[in-house]
Image: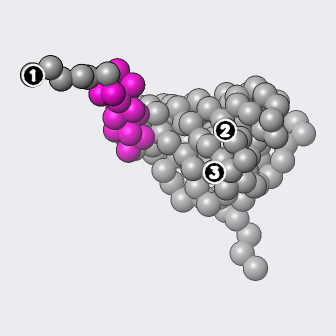
């Protein structure tokens, strides 16, 4: 009897590996509760925008911060995480988040937004707790 493995080859194995890595834990700073973060394209923080986020991992999808997206952790160590996310409308992104200090992140992100490509580096600094009203 001959068994065809065409449908269960490398793509299936890669998909299974991605699912396993997606379940990996995040660096401790990204797994913490949310807070108020200042996000800028400048390492000095100049021109920063303050954003209250429920979880720091959401900063990985800065380009689509108001969209409905699902995130998958592709890899994670104590110092960094690689996160891929997909959003409604065909938008998506791929971000590498590096922990510089317990309150500072460097985010390299790229993807498609509104049918157009984007690619940039962000610097995020936790500046406090979110205001409650």
Determine the residue positioned at 70% across, 31% down: 111
Q: Nearer the viewer, residue 75 or 102?
A: 75
The secondary element bearing badge 3 is classed as: strand
Q: Indicate which disc residue 101 carries.
A: none
Q: Is residue 54 above or below residue 10?
A: below
Point out residue 20 in the picture as x, y percentages from the top left corner.
34, 38
Quadrant in the picture for residue 105: top right
Point out residue 101 in the picture as x, y percentages from the top left corner.
58, 36
- Name the N-terminal-most of marks 3 and 2: 3
- Name the N-terminal-most of marks 3 and 1: 1
Magenta residues, as a range?
Answer: 7-24
Q: Quadrant of the N terminus?
A: top left
Mark 1 is surrounded, within 10 Å at the Cα level, by few (under 14), some (14 to 19) or many (20 or more) other residues, namely: few
The secondary element bearing badge 1 is classed as: loop
Determine the residue positioned at 48% across, 50% down: 31
Q: Indicate which disc residue 69 carries.
A: 3
For mark 2, what is the residue?
92
Q: Which of 86 and 83 is in front in this view?
A: 86
Q: State yes or no: discs 3 and 1 in contact (Cβ < 8 Å).
A: no
Mark 2 is surrounded, within 10 Å at the Cα level, by few (under 14), some (14 to 19) or many (20 or more) other residues, namely: many
Point out residue 55 in the picture as x, y percentages from the top left corner.
58, 55
Mark 3 is surrounded, within 10 Å at the Cα level, by few (under 14), some (14 to 19) or many (20 or more) other residues, namely: some
Q: Does the magenta stretch include residue 128?
A: no
Q: Does the magenta stretch include residue 16?
A: yes
The secondary element bearing badge 2 is classed as: strand
Which circle, 3 or 1, is nearer the viewer?
1
For mark 1, what is the residue?
1
Point out residue 128 in the picture as x, y percentages from the top left corner.
69, 57
């Amino acid at each position: 009897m001959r068994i065809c493995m065409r449908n269960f080859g490398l793509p299936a194995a890669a998909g299974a590996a991605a699912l396993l890595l997606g379940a990996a834990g995040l660096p401790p700073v990204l797994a913490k509760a949310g807070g108020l973060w200042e996000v800028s394209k400048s390492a000095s923080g100049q021109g920063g925008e303050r954003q209250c986020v429920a979880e720091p991992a959401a900063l990985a999808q800065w380009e689509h911060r108001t969209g409905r997206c699902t995130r998958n952790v592709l890899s994670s160590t104590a110092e960094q995480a690689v996160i891929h996310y997909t959003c409604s409308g065909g938008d998506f992104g791929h971000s590498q988040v590096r922990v510089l200090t317990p309150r500072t992140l460097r985010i390299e992100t790229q993807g498609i937004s509104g049918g157009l490509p984007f690619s940039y580096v962000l610097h995020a600094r936790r500046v406090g707790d979110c205001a409650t009203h």
